[in-house]
Structure formats: structure tokens, C-alpha cells
Amino acid sequence: MKKSFIKTVATLALGMMIGSATIAAAAPSTVQAVLAKFTLSVNGQHQALKNEPLVYNGTTYLPVREVAGLLDADASFDNKTKNIELQTKGVDTVDTTVPVSQEWISLADLAKQVDELTAGPLSDNQTGLTIVKGDVKVEIPNLIGKPDGTVETLKTSTGVEIKVKFSDYTTYLPVETLKTLKVLP
């Protein structure tokens, strides 16, 4: 009887361990986050979010689809691959027609050759880059960092198209276009 009792207890204990391990493996991860009330600005314009951001471990999480809409981008989700894709509108993110021989100048080197080079609000309340050389002022709106190897075409405040290259965490502008704009000799 004692052996039978020990077998029964051991079997029950083993069953409970397997059952609790299965429940633990199946339980979804839960986190405690705080709903935050932040002011969100896009290009200097205050925007209201329909869904409040979450703060978890000091990191703020924003609703992707809603933020994409504020940035004039399309958001899509592929449930099969669990991939979120953001596609900006009206900006060439990769331009393979830029000649290899194009001479580029980094913003750091350009700052040494002009009177003023600042990033921030522009005269039309957009955000971008302002270059001043003598009485020539050129503004490049929507100049924001992109992944390495990206070349995009933007329009200056005077309507001149300018290519911008991002490489090794540095932003480059084409020397020839800067000469055309009269900010370089």
C-alpha cells in the first residue's frame, strides 16, 4: 500500500509539473505601461493623436498607423511576416542615377565655408536646413536623416532641386548645386 501511495503521489506531482509548465509556456507576456499625454509636433505644427502614446521602461510607443498618417506616409502590416512597412509619398528615397563622379561636401565642411548653417524651423514654419552666404539665403525643407546609402531629391525654398546623400551618419550636398545656388564659389 505504501508503494502504491508513493507511486500515486509521484505521478500526480509529475503531472502537475508538466501541466504548470504548459500553462506557463502558453501564457502571453504582459507588461505594465502608462498612457501618456504628450504634445506631438510635425514640421512645427501641433498634432493631436486619437490614441494616447504608451510609456514603458522609459520608452514612448506611438501608434504607427496614426503617426504615418501625420507624416503623409502609408503604413501597411503583413501578418504573415509580422512586418510593418512605411512608405513615404512624393520623395525619391533611392536615386540610382547620381553619377559616381559627383563631388559632395559634408555639412560639417560646408559650415566652414558659409556664414551660417543651421537646422531647425524655416521661414515657412517647416523644419529643415538654412544656408547663408553673404546676402544669399537657401532653405532646404524636410531635410531629415535617412539610412546610409540613401540619396533623395529635395527642393530648396527657391525651387531648385538638390540631391542629398546620407552616408556613414553624415549628410552630404552636391558641390555643383551649391555653386549654382551661389553659396559656394
Image: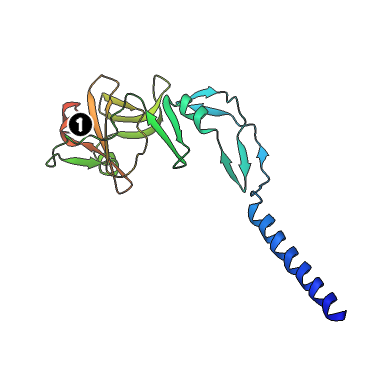
Residue matched to label 1: 178
Q: Position of residue 109 (x, y in %)?
A: 25, 43
Q: Nearer the viewer, residue 158 or 113?
A: 158
* Image quadrant where one finds the C terminus: top left
Display coloring: rainbow
Q: Residue at x 32, y 24 (%)?
A: 90
Q: Quadrant of residue 72?
A: top left
In this rendered view, identify the residue nearer to me: 14 or 169.
14
Q: Position of 86 compared to 148: left or right? A: right
Q: Residue furthest right?
A: 1
User: Of residues 14 and 41, which is closer to you in this image?
Assistant: 14
Q: Judge from the rendering whether residue 116 lies leftward or rightward of residue 34; answer left or right.
A: left
- Above-or-below relation of 168 to 22: above
Return the residue found at the far left: 101
Q: Residue at x 25, y 28 (%)?
A: 134
Mark 1 element type: helix
Q: Sort mark 1 into few (<14), some (14-19) or many (20+) by Cα contacts within 10 Å.
A: some
Q: Position of residue 52 (x, y in %)?
A: 62, 31
Give the image location of residue 120, x and y in percent: 41, 31
Residue drawn where x is 54% and y is 23% of the image: 47
* Image quarter of the N terminus: bottom right
Quadrant hosting residue 113: top left
Q: Position of residue 93 (x, y in %)?
A: 29, 33
Q: Is residue 105 above or below residue 45?
A: below
Relative placement, left or right, of 26 versus 71 is right
Q: Amino acid at mark 1?
A: Leu
Q: Nearest the camera: 100 or 119?
A: 100
Relative to 185, is 24 above or below? below
